[in-house]
Image (cartoon, rainbow, N blue to C red):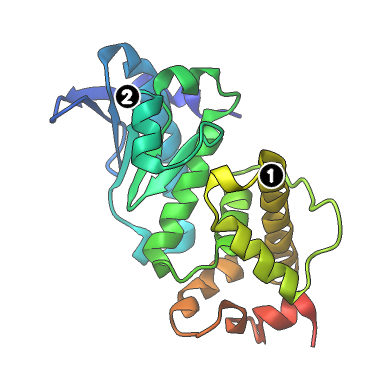
Amino acid sequence: MSYFGLALSAMLVAQAGPGLWVHECDRVDLRVESPADEALGQELAAVACAHAERLQRLFGRQSRGRIRIEIAADMQAWQRQTGRSWQIGAALVCERIILQPARSLRRMQDPDRAVAHELVHLMIRRTVGRACPRWLDEGLADRLSGAPGSGSGGALPDERGLAELERRLGLPDRRVSRAQRLADYRLCRALVDELARQVGVERLVAALPGLRQVKRPLDLELHGRSLRQRLFGG
C-alpha cells in the first residue's frame, strides 16, 4: 500500500532560501522548487517519514539525524548535481537525497520506492561511511525499500565474478548498458537475499559496522562465519 494517502496532514511551514521546505515530521526536510509542487512534496515527505522511522529503528543510533531531500528544478540541474542518467530516479549526494524534477516524478510508476531506496543508502552511509561494498549497498537498498525479489536469472557469482560485479557498479552510467545495470542490480539483490536467508536481515544489518574494522569486506564476520564463507562455502 502506498504511503501517499498519509500526506493529507503534511504542512508547508516555511520558505528558507531557494525553494519551499516541507516538514511532515521531525526527521525529514524536503525542498520543492515551486508552490505548484507543494502537494507532491507533501506526499513524498510522508513517504520519507514513514520509511525513515522504520529504517532508523533497524539501523540504530548511528543512522539517526535529520534527513534532507531535494526535488531538482529540471533535468539539467538533476544531472549536474548527481552525475546520473535520466534512467535513475533518485540519488544520494553526500548526505542529501536528490530526486528528479517534479514533472519526471509524476510520470514514475512508484516514486515512493525510489525515495525509500535512497534512504537505505543514507542509513548505510551514516552507519559505515564508504566501507560498504557497492553490491551489498545496492542489494540491501533494493530489499529494504520493499522491492519484490526478482532473482538473479542464474547462479550466484564466484569470488572473481563478485569482484567484476563490484567493478561494474563503480562505472559511470554512460559506460554500462541499461540491461547490464538492471541485471547487476538483480544480482546484488540475490546476493543479499542469500545472506538474509542464512542469518536474517536484522543480523546482516547489525554486522555492518564491522566493515570499518576489516581490510576486505568479504572478511566481515556474520554470525560466526565470514561473508566469503557464507557466499562461497569453506
Residue nearer the viewer, 57 or 99:
99
Going 46% across and 62% down the picture, which residue do you hit? 59
- Element type at mark 2: loop
Residue pushed farthest right? 154
Residue 221 pos. (x, y %)? 60, 83
- Are circles 1 and 2 on residues that touch, CB within 8 Å? no
- Residue 5 is situated, as x and y percent measured from the top left of the image, at 48, 22
Position of residue 140 relative to residue 217, above or below, is above
Q: Disc 1 marks which amino acid?
A: Leu
Q: Nearer the viewer, residue 152 or 4?
A: 152
Q: Report helix, strand or loop for mark 1.
A: helix
Q: Which mark is residue 182?
A: 1
Residue at the location (60% across, 69% down)?
Answer: 204
Residue drawn where x is 51% and y is 29% of the image: 3
Crowdedness near tag 1: few (<14), some (14–19) or many (≥20) residues, C-alpha within 10 Å: few
- Considering the image in quadrants, where does the N terminus appear? top right
Q: Amino acid at mark 2?
A: Ala
Which residue is denoted by mark 2 in the rendering?
A: 73
Furthest-top residue in this view: 36
Find residue 130 and name its label: none
Q: Residue at 26%, 14% (x, y): give it.
A: 35
